[in-house]
Image: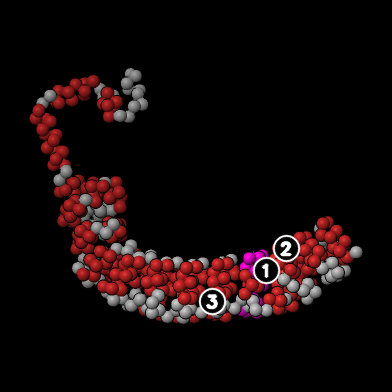
Amino acid sequence: MSILASPCKSPKCRLQQLPSELLIRIFLFGQNPAFVSTCKSIYTISRSPLIRAQFILRRYGPLAALSERCLTSLPIARQLPVVDYLLKLRADPRADADYLLWQSIREQNVNLTILLVDAIQPDTRTLQQYLNGAASHGSISMVDLLVARYGASIDHGDGTVMMLACAENRVELVRHLLTRYHCDPHAFRDQYLRRACLSGHEALVELLLPGADVHAFNDAALQNAVHKNHLGIAYQLLAQGASANVNRGACVILAVQQHHVPILRLLLDHGADPRCQQDSPLQLSCRMGLLDVAQVLVEFASERLAMINTLKGMPLYEAFRHGHADVVDFLLSGGADPSLPLAQQGLHEAILHNHVACVAQLQRAHTELPLPRPLAQYKASASGPMFQLIQHWAS
C-alpha cells in the first residue's frame, strides 16, 4: 500500500506500482529472446517516414496533418521525409493559412519550401505574397529560389519587395536586390530612404543615400529623422545637403516639441533659424518649461535681447503662465522686460494661479515694478503665501 501511495513519478516507481500479476507476465515475456527481437524490429519500423506519415494522417486527417496544432505537438511531422510522404498521401499543404510554408521561409529551409510550393502550385498573386514574406525576413536564399524556380517578380509594380526589405532593415537583402536584380534605390522619389530615416536604420540610410534627392517632398527624409530623434541619420542628411530650415523651420519646431536638444543644436549648427515662425521655438520652450532648449535657442540668436522680448513679452508670459520659475530667472537675467504688456499679463496669471516661485523671482529682480492689478483684486483668489508676497511687494 505504501508503494501505491508513493508520489514518485520516475519510470521505476511507476513500474513498481503495477499489479504483481502483470509484473510476472512482463518478466516471463522478457525471458523470450524472440520477444526482445520483435520489439526492436517494431521500434525500427516505427521510425520509417511512411509509417509516421500514415500515423499522422490517421490521427489528424488530411486537412490538419500539416496544421500548426499537429506540427507543434508532433515534432516528427516537421521532418522533411515525413512531409514528403504526407504530401504524396494528399495532406493539405496549405493547412492553417500556409503555416508550414511560412515557417520554412522564416527558417530559410530551401528543400522544405520546394516541397511545399511544388505541392501548392500557387497562382501569381500567392507567389508574390510568398516573395514579400521572404523579403520581410531578409531571406536572400528564399528570394532567389522564388524568383529563379517559380518566376516570382521582384518588381511587381509597386516596389513592395524593396520596401519590405527596407522597412525591416534587411541591409544585406537590400544590397542583394540592388546588385543582382538592379532595383532602383531611388524609386518613387526615394521612398525607401524616407522610410529608413523614419525607422532609424543608419546603415540602410548610408547604403541608399548616394545619389538620393534629399529634398524630395520638402526634405521629408530629414523631417522624418528629426521627428523620431535619429541624430546620426539627421547628421548624414544635413551633410548630404538637406535644408535645416525646411518647411518654415518645421524641424526646429519638432526638435523643441520633443525636447531633442542634440538634434536642435545640430540643426542650428547647420544654419537653421532659431527665430522661425515668429519665435515659436522660444515660445514653446518657455511654455513647456524646457530651460535647456531656451538656452540653446538664445545662444544661436543674432539679436538675443530682441528675441527674449519678442511679441511684447511673450516668452515671459508663457513662463509665468505655466509656472516655470527657472525659465523666468533665465529670461530676466538675459534682459527680459517685465513691464511689457504680455509679460504683465503673464505676471497677473501667475498670481492668480499661485505660482509663488515665479512671482518671487520677479520681485527679487524688480522690486520697483508695480503689481499688474490693484492688491485688493487678488485677495480672493491668491493663496496665503502668494498674498503675503504681493502684499509685501506692494508696500
Where does label 1 land, which residue?
Answer: 286
The residue drawn where x is 32% and y is 66% is: 172
Of the numbered discs 1 and 2, the one sitting upstream in the chain is 1
What scheme was used to colour the molecule? secondary structure
Give, as a single range, the part of the protein colored magenta: 276-295
Around disc 2, counting alpha carbons within 10 Å, would you say few (fewer than 14), some (14 to 19), or many (20 or more)?
A: many
The residue drawn where x is 54% and y is 71% is: 266
Where does label 3 land, which residue?
Answer: 270
The residue drawn where x is 28% and y is 73% is: 179
Q: Secondary structure at mark 3?
A: loop
* Magenta region includes residue 156: no
Of the numbered discs 3 and 2, the one sitting upstream in the chain is 3
Tell me the kind of residue under disc 2. Answer: Ala
In space, the residues marked 1 and 3 are separated at their CA atoms by 24 Å
> Visible in this render: residue 93?
no
Tell me the kind of residue under disc 1. Answer: Cys
Seen as rendered, the residue at the extreme right is: 395
Q: Mark 1 touching mark 3, by CB under 8 A?
A: no
* Magenta region includes residue 293: yes
Say above or below: 202 vs 62: below
Q: Which mark is residue 325?
A: 2
Residue toward you, 200 or 377:
200
Dividing the picture into quadrants, the one containing residue 362 is bottom right
Dividing the picture into quadrants, the one containing residue 159 is bottom left
Q: Secondary structure at mark 1?
A: helix
The quadrant of the image that shows the C terminus is: bottom right
Seen as rendered, the residue at the extreme top is: 1
- Percent of width and height locating residue 39: 14, 34
Q: Which mark is residue 87?
A: none
